[in-house]
Image (cartoon, rainbow, N blue to C red):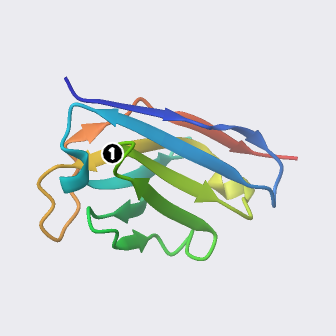
Amino acid sequence: QVQLVESGGGLVQPGRSLRLSCATSGIIFKLSAMGWYRQAPGKGRELVATITGTGSTNYADSVKGRFTISRDNAKNAVYLQMNSLKPEDTAVYYCSADRHYSGSYYPNYWGQGTQVTVSS
């Protein structure tokens, strides 16, 4: 059974930082590409960042220079370090996994999401 469990969300003031974590089980983690999506109220789901099994990363333009995705293959975990947070970063953040990654990211598995709220 595949499980992706996010943690680390919460309420934070603009300009501050948060680090999201995603613990996985049931997948061959080191062979899977991983990604973070987000969905703000009334909006569609947006791909925020991805990281391949070899560590190549990709970011949405809206978070470049502020967010960093990383992974620890020994712990089967992926992280999203979010700095200089803005109110428009408020969303539910979802961890995802693509076990058949071959150049384009199409996740097979999803976590349940963690709420991030950026507000003063």
Question: Most extreme residue toward the top, as rendered?
Answer: 1
Instruction: List x then y, in percent, for residue 109.
Output: 24, 38
Can residue 72 be spotted in the picture? Answer: yes
| Rendered view: 22 above or below 32 | above
Q: Position of residue 62 (x, y in %)?
A: 56, 70
Can residue 45 be seen here? The reply is no
Q: Position of 21 compared to 101: left or right? A: right
Which of 79/10 is in front? 79
* Mark 1 surroundings within 10 Å by alpha-carbon count, few (fewer than 14), some (14 through 19), many (20 or more): many
Q: Is residue 56 left or right of residue 100?
A: right
Query: Does residue 52 appear to the left or right of 41 in the view shown?
Result: left
Q: Where is residue 78 in the image (x, y as percent from the top left)?
A: 43, 49
Rendered view: 57 above or below 81: below
Q: Is mark 1 on a helix, strand or loop?
A: strand
* Residue to which mark 1 is pinned: 96
Determine the residue positioned at 36% across, 54% down: 35
Q: Quadrant of residue 101?
A: bottom left
In which image quadrant can residue 85 be found?
bottom right
Question: x and y percent of residue 40 in the render?
Answer: 55, 46
**Quarter of the figure that contains the N terminus:** top left
**Residue at image x 60%, y 57%?**
81
Observer-nearest of 70 and 41: 70
Q: Residue furthest right?
A: 120
The total of numbered circles placed on residues is 1
Please indicate whether residue 107 sits to the left or right of residue 77 in the image. left
Query: Which residue is found at the position 73% from the left and 55% from the top?
Result: 17
Q: Front-most of 88 and 80?
A: 80
The amino acid type, in three-letter code, at marker 1 is Ser
